[in-house]
Image (cartoon, rainbow, N blue to C red):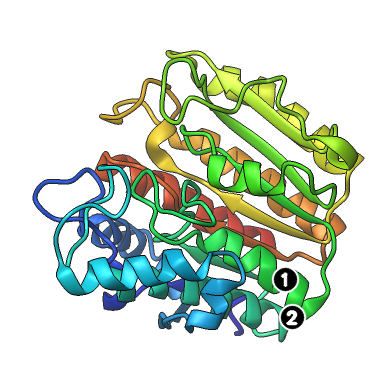
């Protein structure tokens, strides 16, 4: 039986993790993988090897100067890649380029008919800007995919949906004036959490006015609040029906995450994935890519990402 979901895991992706007790450590992929195997999800998806992006692929979203800076810091192996949150280590360039390259490979797999959907647990690096790293994110793999969708495949209207606890500023602002990037982001209120953005009044500018949806959640909100607000996401995607869906499902919005204050359970992630798969089946020929995003409680990220992967598989069966 053909597997309709390609799952990207491998040693090269696991190397995207920062040393010395950093919240985004190199053990995150393994935590997810152990739970996926326990649930038998590894037998229901097509396990796909990572690949490293070529510099030309990175340049579609990032500046030449940023790519060169990361290469230099990777060779040095010390210091910070940004203003302090994202430390350099030997091989960080190759690891970050593998996150981006695996995402592009996932896109190519979908567009060639090799899979209906993909899931990239080590991915969704939504704080990286075109010209710099930020918030544990070196290269913005989702931004690279958006540009590849347009340059290689001529896909015009793309939806980006983000339920990570942090606002996806590295994707909101580059496309704030782009009417064909439909954006929906449910996150903890920016007045209480990094990066301090994603206010409800930020709905796009110019020709893109109204195409962006930011839903700030107050600390302590849980599943029922999420389910209620989720309805607005579906209305938004129906108002601006996309040709392709990108889903960042950070697990740092679950109760017990050490860096945030929302109180979801994995049921929130399962609900979002199930509903997005249904919308994808209706609007995009089933095409959706999932990205793991943040999450710093290992049990939480394993449970949330497995819930998403399970729904991706169920939605394609």
Q: Dots 1 and 2: beta carbons under 8 Å?
A: yes
Q: Quadrant of the N terminus?
A: bottom right
Cα–Cα span, label 1 and label 2: 6 Å
- Mark seen at residue 219: none
Residue 284 sits in which quadrant? bottom right
Which residue corresponds to the image point at 55% horizontal and 49% vertical from the top-left?
A: 248
Which residue corresponds to the image point at 84% horizontal and 57% vertical from the top-left?
A: 157
Which residue corresponds to the image point at 18% horizontal and 64% vertical from the top-left?
A: 89
Residue 76's place in the image compared with 294, above or below, is below
Q: How many tags in the picture?
A: 2
Which residue is disc 2 drawn over? 152
Residue 239 sits in which quadrant? top right
Using the image as rendered, state which of residue 117 and residue 69 is in the foreground: 69
Residue 255's place in the image compared with 167, above or below, is above
Residue 38: percent from left, percent from top:
30, 60
Q: Is residue 153 visible?
A: yes
Circle 2 packing at 10 Å, graded few (<14), some (14-19), many (20+), is few
Which residue is disc 1 drawn over? 149
Q: Secondary structure at mark 1?
A: helix
Residue 103: percent from left, percent from top:
53, 71
Circle 1 packing at 10 Å, graded few (<14), some (14-19), many (20+), is many
Q: Is residue 11 left or right of residue 281?
A: left
Residue extending furthest toward the front: 65
């Amino acid at each position: 039986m053909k597997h309709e979901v390609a799952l990207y895991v491998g040693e090269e992706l696991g190397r995207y993790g920062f040393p010395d007790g950093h919240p985004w450590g190199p053990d995150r992929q393994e935590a997810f993988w152990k739970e996926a195997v326990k649930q038998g999800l590894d037998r229901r998806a097509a396990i796909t090897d990572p690949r490293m992006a070529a510099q030309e692929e990175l340049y579609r979203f990032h500046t030449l100067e940023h790519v060169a800076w990361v290469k230099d810091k990777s060779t040095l192996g010390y210091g910070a890649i940004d203003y302090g949150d994202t430390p350099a280590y030997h091989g960080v360039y190759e690891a970050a380029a593998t996150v981006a390259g695996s995402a592009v490979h996932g896109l190519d797999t979908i567009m060639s008919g090799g899979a209906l959907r993909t899931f990239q647990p080590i991915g969704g690096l939504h704080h990286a800007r075109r010209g710099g790293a930020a918030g544990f994110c070196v290269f913005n793999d989702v931004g690279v995919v958006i540009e590849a969708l347009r340059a290689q495949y001529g896909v015009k209207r793309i939806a980006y949906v983000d339920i990570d606890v942090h606002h996806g500023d590295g994707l909101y602002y580059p496309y704030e004036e782009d009417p064909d990037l439909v954006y929906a982001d449910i996150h903890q209120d920016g007045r209480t959490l990094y990066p301090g953005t994603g206010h409800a009044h930020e709905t796009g500018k110019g020709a893109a006015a109204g195409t962006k949806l930011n839903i700030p959640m107050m600390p302590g909100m849980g599943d029922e609040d999420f389910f209620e607000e989720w309805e607005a996401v579906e209305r938004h995607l129906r108002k601006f029906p996309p040709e392709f869906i990108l889903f960042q499902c950070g697990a740092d919005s679950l109760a017990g995450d050490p860096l945030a204050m929302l109180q979801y359970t994995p049921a929130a992630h399962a609900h979002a994935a199930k509903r997005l798969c249904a919308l994808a089946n209706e609007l995009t020929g089933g095409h959706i890519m999932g990205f793991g995003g943040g999450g710093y409680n290992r049990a939480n990220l394993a449970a949330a990402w497995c819930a998403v992967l399970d729904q991706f598989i169920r939605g394609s069966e």
